[in-house]
Image: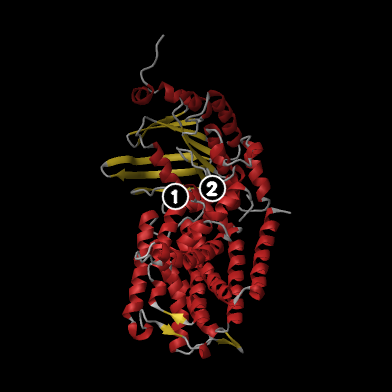
Amino acid sequence: MTDAGKAWMLHVALIAALFALHFVLPAYHHGVLARVMVLAVFAMGYNLLFGYAGLLSLGHAMFFGAGLYGAGLAAYHLGWSVSAAFSAGILAGISLSLAVGVLALRTTGVAFMIVTMMFAQAFYLATLHFNAWTRGDEGLVLQTASRTLGSLSLADPATRYLAALALFSLVLLLTLAVVRSRLGRVLVAIRENEPRTIMLGYDTFAAKLAATVLSGAICAAAGAAYALLFGYVGSTLVSVQYSILPLLWVLMGGAATTIGPLIGTLLMYYLVDLSGGPLDRLLPGWHLTYLGVVGVALVLLILFFPKGILGTVRGRWLRWLP
Amino acid sequence: MTVLLSTRGLKKSFGGLRAVDGVDFALETGEIRAIIGPNGAGKTTFVSLVCGRILPDAGTIVFDGGDITALPAHARVRLGIAYTFQITSIYPRLGVFDNVALAAQRAGGGGLRERAMAALERVHLERRHAEPAGTLPYGHQRLLELAMALALKPRLLILDEPTQGLSDAEIADFITLVRVLSRDATILLIEHNMPVVMELAGRITVMESGKVLAEGTPAEISADPAVQRAYLGAPADG
């Protein structure tokens, strides 16, 4: 089989496995996986820009937030239907990433990290400032009645899982198609050597802007889905740790791998979830928050596992992994 | 013969340094032209202005009858101006084939694989196509960069000190290769190795302190007393 054939087969098999898990997982883990799939979409959007184009943004919480608030505010205040609110969230993400991209892509490296982080902080502060509509930290709870798609309630665990899986599958296959496309190859070329890429005749600014908007749209889709599936929209979801988390998920799973973001998100979720109890017993009185676990994981990853899980697998065994 | 590239009054300063100071230059289609001159004469700055990596402070650049002075570098590459860097610039972590395929993809048209392999064959690297480019010996990396330029199907090929760091045997192969390439493309090369210049160039442009000092055939240039003072050193007698 060709490498392309193997890659498509692997992705379809992963989607089939996630569908099968829907029928066998116990309720708690079923709920966790639904949430992880939505957050993995966020990570896949981040990975497109960070892993493939090599642009390290520290502000992707704002794109997740654009989707979260775009969909959440439309559903809460305007009573828009699920599909209209979801579209509003994605549109908000596209508009924001286009505007931020045009400005931030004038910089590179550390300056790009700082500029994106500043924009994201401005977005976060705006969600607090416009308290009258957003209710800031306290946030908005979307009523179950407003979260229906036809006769299906998105608050129902089964529907929620399958909706999350549908979005995840769509974005996974889209990512695979993009990284195998002409644009995907140009993004890798920019990451590896931008001056050379310009001198091959590529408009690298346009390619980076396209990647930023695609990344912003995918992250916004994750945010919009989060609002509509879990019914909560609040400032904590756009704070700075939501810019760091996708970086961590992608680093753990393997930057510039299509499936790495899911693996990283899943492992990190369970690491935080399962480490809380033992840590409290082991180090009583230290009050380690989940951010402590996240920080330690980030340091260990960068020191010992810079290519992440799938990056290492690809380097050692499966050269064809996309 | 028609003029492929011309510049008029081209100027570029970096702070107080006039790197290129009013250069009028014309290159005819099909030529092999060498630019020589002492270090700091403005050679690399001049070709960087031509290929658009930097923009001039004053003056105009005309390529194939069109004013390209304000065009960004990538658009000039699309018009047919290819550039190989003074310090080899490839994608070291990508495969040899992928390096050339990126160039061939941009040039467009069908048969991407064939066109990329054909470019590799011209520099005799086709058997190493699966290796990571960064593991090639230095001389082969220079040839790979040349193959990338060829895959662009350029009309003007600018080579910035192409033989720097090559062995004598590699230089001999390189001279043969450039002769073959010059059937399809006009060639402008910056070169310090005088035997290479004398053997390849139809005409030579000598730069000094950002200005054109002299221009002519290799015989005229080696006989020019001003050039000898500036660059070649005093003539060896007896």
Q: Is residue A150 visible?
A: no
Q: Position of residue B80 (x, y in %)?
A: 54, 48
Mark 1 or 2: the one toward you: 1
Tell me the amino acid under the disc marked 2: Gly
- For the question of whether residue A191 can be seen, the reply is yes
In the rendered structure, the residue with mark 2 lies on which chain?
B
Cα–Cα gap, marks 1 and 2: 45 Å
Residue located 34% across and 44% down the image: B11
Q: Residue furthest right?
A: A1
Name which residue type carries label 1: Leu
The residue at the point 63 percent across, 48 percent down is A317
Establish whether labels 1 and 2 are both on one chain.
Answer: no
Task: Indicate which disc residue A210 carries.
Answer: none
Q: Position of residue B133 (x, y in %)?
A: 56, 41
Q: Quadrant of the N terminus of chain A?
A: bottom right
Measuring 65% from the left and 65% from the top, which residue is drawn there? A14
Q: To which residue does mark 1 refer?
A: A303
Display coloring: secondary structure
Few, some or many residues within 10 Å of mark 1 (<14, 14–19, 20+) = few
Residue matched to label 2: B80
Picture quarter containing residue A257?
bottom right
Instruction: Give coordinates of residue A17: x percent, y percent.
Output: 66, 67
Compared to residue B219, the image places residue A129 above or below, namely below
Up-down relation of residue A313 to residue B180 (above or below): below
Q: Percent x, y for residue A144? A: 51, 88
Task: Say which quadrant the C terminus of chain A sits in.
Answer: bottom right
Q: Residue at x 66, y 43 (%)?
A: B117
Label count reads 2
Closest to the observer, A229 or A90: A229
Where is B200 relative to B141, above or below?
above
Q: Nearer the viewer, residue B8 or A91?
A: A91
The kind of secondary structure element at disc 1 is helix
